[in-house]
Image (cartoon, grey):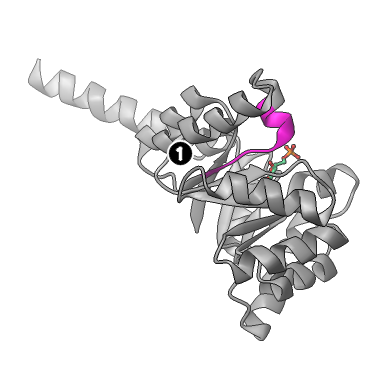
Amino acid sequence: MKFFIDTANLAQIKEAYDLGILDGVTTNPSLMAKEGITGEAAILKHYVDICNIADGDVSAEVISTDYEGMIAEGEKLAALHENIVVKVPMIKDGIKAIKYFSSKGIKTNCTLIFSAGQAILAAKAGATYISPFVGRLDDISFDGMELIAQIAHIFAVQAYPTQILAASIRNPIHIIKSAEMGAHVITSPLPPILALLSHPLTDKGLAQFLADHAKANG
Ligand code: E4P
């Protein structure tokens, strides 16, 4: 399973890359706004900055919701860097745009997936990735992990090449369960990724080893 970081914060992207386990980055308009990146020129430059840190796919989301707008925006984004993946919302014109990008060899990430039916449509259109939002489903008392399992089953049975990118990850259990359910990729903020490192018995065991070594070696 690949690990993407879900942020537009350059320092956090660098920190995650320095760990040596990161495979890519996802952003969205809310994450860009959170970093204070506004205006077309600054937004495009920020995507290039991310691509220059990240060695892997970088999702950049279109703002348009009509077919022509998405095509124009997506082509501009894709031309920025070879690692750009055009992120397209799960709406009717989005599906048409994904089909177009797929025919042009431009990678896509279909975002805001909340049902298996949406995932099937995006896969049929040729999406490179589909992003089911696990945490937002959990927030409204639907089991986000059940959706990952259902989509993983369907994609395996149908042999769809589209990759399942588990998104809206909120905690380390979401990451572990995504691996168990067969997601191809998770995208997570930095804290849940770092939380995978921790176990109290690891800390206790290491402290004991170091204390025993110090006692024996003076
Ligand atoms: C997906 O790519 C989105 O950027 C993201 O995972 C949404 O997560 P949130 O529900 O925490 O905003």
Q: Residues within 10 Å of mark 1 (few under 14, many from 20)?
A: many
Q: Amino acid at mark 1?
A: Cys
Tell me residue 207's x, y (percent): 32, 25
- Residue at 90% of width from left, 45% of height from top? 140
Q: Quick check: 1 left or right of 138?
A: left
Q: Nearer the viewer, residue 99 or 69?
A: 69
Quarter of the figure that contains the C terminus = top left
Tell me residue 55's x, y (percent): 39, 44
Q: Which residues are magenta?
A: 25-32
Asked if residue 133 shows in the view, the reply is no
- Residue at 81% of width from left, 56% of height from top? 67
Asked if residue 119 shows in the view, the reply is yes
Is the residue indicated by label 1 positioned so its CB lies within 8 Å of ligand 1? Answer: no
Q: Is residue 218 shown in magenta?
A: no
Check disc 1 and report the residue beneath it: 51
Q: Residue furthest right?
A: 140
Q: Is residue 30 shown in magenta?
A: yes
Q: Nearer the viewer, residue 14 or 179?
A: 14
| Residue 63 drawn above or below residue 129 | above
